[in-house]
Amino acid sequence: MSFTLRDATLSDIPAITEIYEDSVLNGVASYEMTPPGEAEMTERFSTIIGNGYPYIAAVDPEGALLGYAYASAFRTRTAYRFIVEDSIYLAPEARGQRVGKALLAELIRRCTALGFRQMVAVIGGAHPASVAVHRAAGFEHGGLMKGTGFKHGRWLDTIIMQLALGEGTTTDPQPDVYPDTLYRK
């Protein structure tokens, strides 16, 4: 499958909403039960972009959105400001086509360049494909939370995976990567 990566834009919101809706209704990556509409997805997108995090789109040669990925705050307390959480969602036809792998690699590259030191994946439903793509990118198992969600008539586990970015914890971070004002004290 041929595709390119680029920054996601507001014009991608209808397709982003459609991809996420499929994940909410048919998958376990998200523990949401009711898919949000375009207005809510626009607000989420604007918040992520507005806080300086990367939001990436994968598009086919005709420009159709195949998937998207973004980084966001893992937690909003100040001490967590050097850690990001990744999120990746793919259109059904893009699954198993290396689109997720490419999106994750680009997200890691961008977050490292921004000065983040850790990336965390919170994998709903302990989804094997998501675990595999993160493991292939160098993520390590960080923990298992059993029965954290109930969706599609079954209890779901959540796997935490983690990847050190850049110098990780070997050196102190630059204090001005993201100002403390974005975080609760």
Image (cartoon, rainbow, N blue to C red):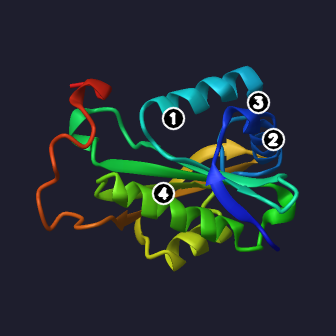
Label 2, label 3: how far apart the Cα atoms are:
17 Å
| Distance Cα–Cα, label 1 vs label 4 | 19 Å
Tell me: residue 8, above or below residue 58.
Answer: above
Q: Residue at x 74, y 28 (%)?
A: 36
Which residue in the structure is indicated by mark 3?
34
- Kindly check if marks 4 and 3 are in contact, taking CB atoms under 8 A apart as contact: no
Residue 37, above or below 49:
above
Disc nearer the start of the sequence (3/1): 3
Q: How crowded is mark 2: few (under 14 residues within 10 Å), some or many (20 or more)?
A: some
Q: Earlier in the sequence, mark 2 or mark 4?
A: 2
Residue ID for mark 4: 121
Q: Is residue 63 left or right of residue 52?
A: right
The amino acid sitting under disc 2 is Ala
Question: From the viewer's perspective, is the residue at label 2 or at label 4 nearer?
Answer: 2
The answer to whether the residues at label 1 and label 4 have Cβ atoms under 8 Å apart is: no
Q: Which of marks 4 and 3 is nearer the N terminus?
A: 3
Percent position of residue 156, x then y: 63, 53
Q: Residue at x 59, y 75 (%)?
A: 132
* Three-letter amino acid code at the position of disc 3: Thr
Q: Name the residue under label 2.
A: 15
